[in-house]
Image (spheres, rainbow, N blue to C red):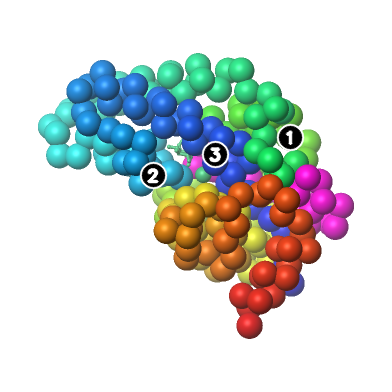
Amino acid sequence: NIQGFIFDLDGVLTDTAEYHYLGWQKLADEENIPFTREANEALRGVSRRESLMLIIGDRPYSEAQIQEMMERKNRYYVELIENITAKDLLPGAIALLDELRQTGMKIGIGSASKNAHTVIKRLGIADKVDAIADGYSVQKPKPAPDLFLYAAQQLDLKPQQCVVVEDAAAGIEAALAGGMWTVGLGPVERVGAAHVVFPSLAGVTWADLRAKLNEAAK
Ligand code: G6P
Ligand code: MG
C-alpha cells in the first residue's frame, strides 16, 4: 500500500546532473586528469567526495588538496545553478508531482546534494514537498539506504510504503537496500535493477506507475 514518493533531485526533477558533470569536467581539465562524459555516468548520484575519488584514482593528492578541489568544483556548480528557474524542471516532473499530491501521496526529496535546498527553491517546488533529505541529513552516502530511510521517517512512512524515483545506479541500490519500491529513469544498463524503468518522467502518470508496480509485485 503505497503512500508516499521520494524523488531524487539531480537528473530526476531537473537536469542538474549536467551541471555536476560540467563542474567536474572543468576541474579535471585544470588538473590535467582525463575525464569524459562517459566516465561521468559512474558519478551519477555519487557524493561529492566519492566523485572526486573516482576522478583522481590513485593520484597522490593530499587531504588539503582534496578539500580544495571539492570546494572548487562546488564553486563552479553553484555558479551554474544560479540561473535555474521553474523552466528547468524536466518534462513531466511537475505534472506527476501535482497528480500524486492530489491522490493524497506524501512527497519527499532524497538528494545527496548539499545544494538541494537552493535548487528546490529556485525550481519553485518547495511548497509541493513534505520533506527534504539532503547532503546534510545523514553520514553515509548512497548506495547506503540511510538517506532514503531518513526521508521516509520524515514523511512518517514505512520504507515499504514508499516509492523512490532515481536516475542513478547508486540511488536504486540505496532504495532497494532500504526496502522501498523503485522507479528507475534512464537506460536499463544504468537503472535496470529498479522494479520499474521509464526513459524519463515525460507523460508518466500515477495510473502508469501503479500498474507497473503491481506487475512487479507479482
Ligand atoms: C547528487 C548528484 C551528484 C552529486 C551529489 C553531491 O547525488 O547526483 O552528482 O555529486 O549530489 O552534491 P553536492 O551538491 O553536495 O556536491
Ligand atoms: Mg540523480
Q: Residue at x 46, y 23 (%)?
A: 77
Which residue matches tag 1?
125
Amino acid type, label 2: Glu
Q: Residue furthest right?
A: 102
Question: Is residue 6 visible in this depiction of the protein?
Answer: yes
Tell me if residue 147 comes above or below residue 211 in the rendering.
above
In this rendering, which labeled residue sits more in front, label 2 or label 3?
Answer: 2
Residue 48 point in image, percent of width and height: 39, 36
Q: Is mark 1 within 8 Å of ligand 2?
A: no
In the picture, the disc for residue 110 is none
Determine the residue located farthest toward the bottom in the rendered image.
218
What range is drawn magenta here? 95-114
Q: Which residue type carries mark 1?
A: Ile
| Element class at badge 1 | loop
Q: Earlier in the sequence, mark 3 or mark 1?
A: 3
In the visual, does 192 lie left or right of 70? right
Q: Give the CA distance from mark 3 to mark 1.
A: 14 Å
Report if residue 62 lies within the magenta region: no
Instruction: Give residue 12's quadrant in the image.
Output: top right
Label 1 neighbour load within 10 Å: few <14, some 14-19, many 20+: some
**From this viewpoint, is residue 151 visible?**
no
